[in-house]
Amino acid sequence: MRYFQRFVIVLTKKKFKSEKLMMQKNNIKHLLISRTDNIGDVILTLPLVGILKQQFPEMKISFLGREYVRAIIEHCADIDSFFSYDALTHLSKEDAIAQIKAHAFDAVIHAFPNKPIALLMKQAGVHNRIGTSHRLYHWWTCNARVNFSRAKSDEHEAQLNLKLLKPFHIETTDNLERLGEYLGLQCKDQLPPHLKSLLKTDRFNLIVHPFTNGHAREWPVSHFNALIRQLPKERVHVIVTGSQKESVVIQDRMLSQCPDITNVAGQCSLRELVQLIANSDGLVANSTGPLHIAAALGIHALGLFPITKGMDPKRWGPIGKKAEVLTANPECQSPRCRHKQDCLCMESITVDQVKAVILNWAKNADAVCV
């Protein structure tokens, strides 16, 4: 094992002529970004797209992603087309290769390592194939490998994504506030009548998204219930969102405690959720996709995070002019924090802390309206 590790280190440091790709404006006419994971991950890849579009405005940029993130990609001004990962993976190998060839991609950036996709891109003859050197299969599927590791990094996910621009010789900023300017997420859709009717014109419309489908540590439901009960109803209108699966828990554990909330959990497609968020005033959530949507769309967004490295806001915090975070008590040493759904650290974020942020938003919104 030690010999193998030294072998990989030597390969990582060694430079090959085949890796000296000329990523110039003239020879990359169609670029594919491959990111086949979740909503938040996709949104934190958008600054990479925005920077490329600024540098090469004539370049066509396509995005390979899971079908359920299509609405996010179609709301990004810097992405020209969506390429469905779900559709591609349901094809035979020969048909998948033929479809990739039909798109005539000049380059692909593997923003999320995916071995089958990496193999397909090479077999389809995509000329420039960029990925991290810390995936062994990239040594025979990519011809431009960037030496960095996400697993042990202290950098933000958006900053890590930018490292994949190295073969393009682009000067980039690591400033997260500046990176927020490159998100490119917009919602120009007309709000459908059934969603418009949910919003109150005389109150601050706050979306509460209490769950993460088990993807992150969660603030307790009891804390969310207490927060909703303590917010002044004459000033703040609460809309609760969530997946179809989460709607059952919301029905059982929240509606009985907070009967005045507007519950749309399980009732919105992702496109409709984007529309609803864009037309609301603020959102509070754990580290999950809707938090990043709200931050990217420029509304008030408050994220609740643990202090655990790799899960904290230093790595996954929302990006946007009105994005804020609250973190758990840094003194927390509870062994219970190994469990996503039973975390004393997350419990240490108080209802009063969250309420203060929301009331400040509502106060400032009132001042603007006067």
Image (tube, rainbow, N blue to C red):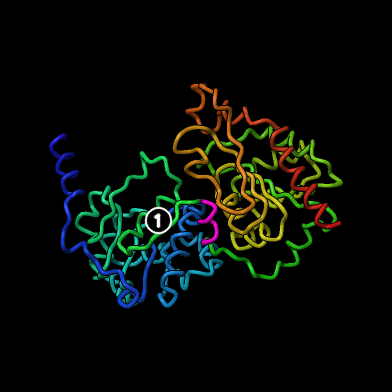
Image point (51%, 60%), residue name: 69
Judge the density around disc 1: few (<14), some (14-19), many (≥20) Cα neighbours within 10 Å: many
Q: Where is residue 185 in the image (x, y as percent from the top left)?
A: 56, 63
Depth order, front residue of 367/64:
367
Depth order, front residue of 79/253:
79
Please tell me whether the stretch drawn in magenta is mainly helix, strand or loop: helix
Q: Say which quarter of the image contains residue 92.
A: bottom left
Q: Is residue 287 magenta?
A: no
Q: Position of residue 271 (x, y in %)?
A: 60, 63
Image point (33%, 54%), residue name: 114
Depth order, front residue of 30/343:
30
Q: Say which quarter of the image contains residue 94.
A: bottom left
Residue 23 against residue 231 in the figure, above or below: below
Q: Position of residue 83 (x, y in %)?
A: 42, 68
Image point (63%, 66%), residue name: 187
Amino acid of disc 1:
Leu
Q: What element carries label 1?
A: helix
Image point (83%, 41%), residue name: 232
Quadrant that contains the N terminus? top left
Q: Is residue 82 left or right of residue 301?
A: left
Residue at the disc numbered 1: 162
Point out the stretch of residues depicted in magenta: 176-182
Q: Is residue 180 magenta?
A: yes
Q: In this view, does 281 lie to the left or right of 61?
A: right
Residue 56 against residue 218 in the figure, above or below: below
